[in-house]
Image (spheres, rainbow, N blue to C red):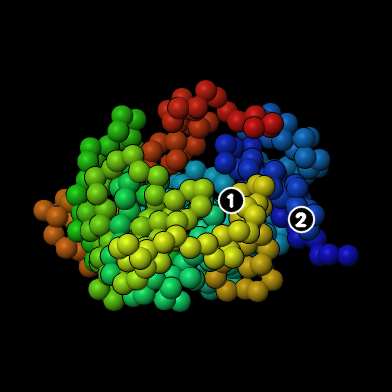
Amino acid sequence: MSKKYRVAVVGGAGTWGRNYLRAYAAHPDCQIVALVDRAKDRRQEFADHYGITTVFDDLEDLLAREVPDVVSVILPVAANPAAVMACARAGVKAVSCEKPIAVSLAEADAMVDTCRQHGTALACGTAHWEVHALLDTAAWVQAGNIGALKAASIPGGLPNEVSGGGCVQLTMLRALTGREVEWVEGWELPPAPGWKVPPGGDERDVDCPAYGRLGLAGGLVCHIPQPREVRCRVWVEGEAGQVWLSPPCPVLIQGLGPDSAPVYPEFLHAPEPGDLFLPVIERLLRAHDRGGEAQCSGHDYRQALEIAIALKRSAREGNRRIHLPLEDRSQLIYPHPYRLRGGDVAGWASIGYTGPPKVEG
């Protein structure tokens, strides 16, 4: 008999949390031991649908009763730090949250450090699975199949949110190149309607579109143009080819000029999962067993937050070059009110939804 992982979903009756709930319920090696959500009526509908017998209003109530093997924290950004660190301190072996990881760098640091101190694998977001075979493609690039990298780009820019949405492209860039960002030069555009800071916040700290240049280790420079309609998430060029991270499948090109041609390594032929969230939760099961960093980690999304903050700071300071890591860890970005507080507080229409999620969605 295969091992059963005892899992809990916090915020499982939310728009994104229901995806985790569905994937855990479908996984043969997982037993959902609790659903935590304060939307009691909606929570009960989900619990009944998936046969979950234990529900709680708060994570603290769950952890006082038992410590699951894995917890997915799918809460608004403002609640991420306290929930993730509570899981680590209670002894949960693998925990995940959603993007962006936190509002401030100090909060993100505390999350990553606390999880490492307590031996908890911290995962964040879904960037590694939003383009088919991304990590296999990254390994192929880093093995030298298009030669030494000499240029990179995020072709569509960072529209709407340099942090809230842009963290995906920034995480993909680091994964594909295998390099850290060492400096940024940034410009920003006005935030779209609906983006605003909490009372008392600085309007300059609101999430917004951004563009500019990123300097990665080894002298590689990534250009980020002003936002435009381009499906490619990340592009890199080597001395002997190019790669386009474009959904649904990456485009890999070897050779230069008239001698160039697309190639199709075996990993591109592997079938995509029927449910994106199955590999997303399976990385938590692997992390539970192996320990150490989880794939698509909290560290990855902390780095993305830092890059986003640096882009905005550079724009504020005359587009000057900002070197990383940032010394002032109190710096922050306020995401959209829906991301910050959730639909039940900010209003579902604030982000374009007609209402709260349904079980069958």
For the point 55% across and 70% down, the residue is 293
Q: Position of residue 121 (x, y in %)?
A: 58, 67
Q: Amino acid at mark 1?
A: Val
Above or below 66: residue 160: above
Q: Amino acid at mark 2?
A: Cys
Name the side, left or right, on which 38 lies relative to 213.
right
Contact (CB < 8 A) between labels 2 and 1?
Answer: no
Which quadrant: the C terminus?
A: top right
Does dot 2 land on a helix, a strand or a loop? strand
For the point 33% across and 39% down, the residue is 229
Whichever of callouts 2 and 1 sits on the residue coming sooner in the sequence is 2
Q: Which residue is mark 1?
A: 73
| Nearer-the-camera pick, 226 or 283 | 226
Residue 153: which disc? none
Does dot 1 land on a helix, a strand or a loop? strand
Q: Position of residue 302 (x, y in %)?
A: 41, 61
Calculate the distance from the C-alpha at mark 2 to the C-alpha at mark 1. Answer: 16 Å
Q: Position of residue 271 (x, y in %)?
A: 65, 54
Q: Which residue is mark 2?
A: 30
Q: Mark 1 Cα within 10 Å, few/some/many (few <14, many 20+)? A: many
Question: Residue 287's image quarter?
Answer: bottom right
